[in-house]
Image (tube, rainbow, N blue to C red):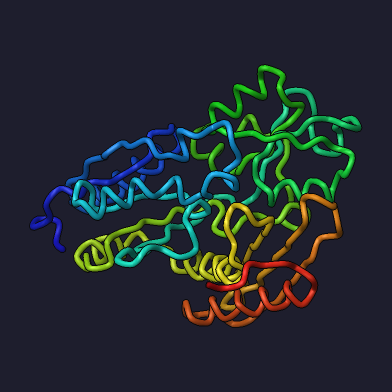
Amino acid sequence: MSPSQTPTIVIATRESRLALWQAEHVKALLEARGHSVQLLGMTTKGDQILDKSLSKVGGKGLFVKELEVALEEGRAHIAVHSLKDVPMELPEGFALACVMEREDPRDAFVSPHYESLDALPQGAVVGTSSLRRQVLLQALRPDLKIEPLRGNLDTRLRKLDEGQYDAIVLAAAGLKRLGLEARIRATFAPSAMLPAAGQGALGIEVRSDRQDLIDALAPLAHQATWLTVAAERAVSRAMGGSCSMPLAAHGTFTQDVLQLDAAWGEPEDKTPLVRAQASAPVTTLAQAEALGDAIAQRLRAGGARGVAPA
């Protein structure tokens, strides 16, 4: 698809400030390559249901379903997602056409009064609705009171500022993208607070039969990020992972060698985390996914309870 022959590319996006930033970012990159681009803002069920945890109302797929319907109906051509919100298995007829260079994948500690997790008083209230963050926080500070926290990034910060929590944990990437880096009091080392699969990376979804769009998006892809998140997502896929599973997976490249770390915990009984680690040369998606599968096997061998494949 050459820019001179390209009809307008319509991007389906959620209407939160962060989602719109992400869509505008992709729009600018495509326009710089000569494409005509428009945004189609949409409200998803994940944005509408704020009084229940995602694990109880259908998972993170609630953030992408309406966007996929827009692609299927032809009202939009591509959808820009935070990759950690994208289900591990896409519906038939859809494809992940591009993974862009990753922003900071770490979790951020945000608090108006305390400089770090260690500085919180005993029994302090920390907000997060992520089961992954809950089990990792429990491992670091079992005395803390972990309370649910839903809503977009601005809503979560408002609830913190209103005094509903002593601190909250957010993805550093979202804060940085919106120019809110000053709100970060500390970032967690991945060794202490292992990120979610795909955290900090943007993925672009298309209909799988739109090779023209896949070709147009190819220059935006970042191969090292794509391989890394493919390995991370393979761990989650092999474990049957979703937002209802307290699972973390994070990879780092050194030249062509990918080191992959994963952790699984049980939020109800505070048993010790199950951890697994492996590294291997990775230059293809198949190699990345094989490494992820191997990590999942090690987690299960260590006692992690995944969901059996359907």
Residue 168 higher or lower than 270, as above or below: above
Where is residue 73 drawn, in percent x and y? 21, 51
Residue 187 location, quadrant: top right
283 and 170: which is toward the camera: 170
Q: Residue at x 45, y 33 (%)?
A: 48
Q: Residue at x 45, y 46 (%)?
A: 62
Residue 45 location, quadrant: top left
Please state, as top left, top right, bottom left or bottom right, where the N terminus lies in the image.
Answer: bottom left
307 and 170: which is toward the camera: 307
- Describe residue 43's horizontal placement relative to residue 287 as left or right: left
Q: Residue at x 72, y 19 (%)?
A: 163
- Describe residue 24's horizontal placement relative to residue 48 as left or right: left
Where is residue 176 drawn, in percent x and y? 55, 39
Where is residue 71 drawn, in percent x and y? 26, 52
- Describe residue 88's horizontal placement relative to residue 246 as left or right: left
Where is residue 226 drawn, in percent x and y? 47, 66
Residue 59 higher or lower than 257, as above or below: above
Q: Residue at x 55, y 66 (%)?
A: 233
Residue 92 higher or lower than 64, as above or below: below
- Count every numbered label the image shows and give the total: 0
- Describe residue 253's horizontal placement relative to residue 142 as left or right: left
Given the current orientation, which residue lies at the most extreme top position?
162
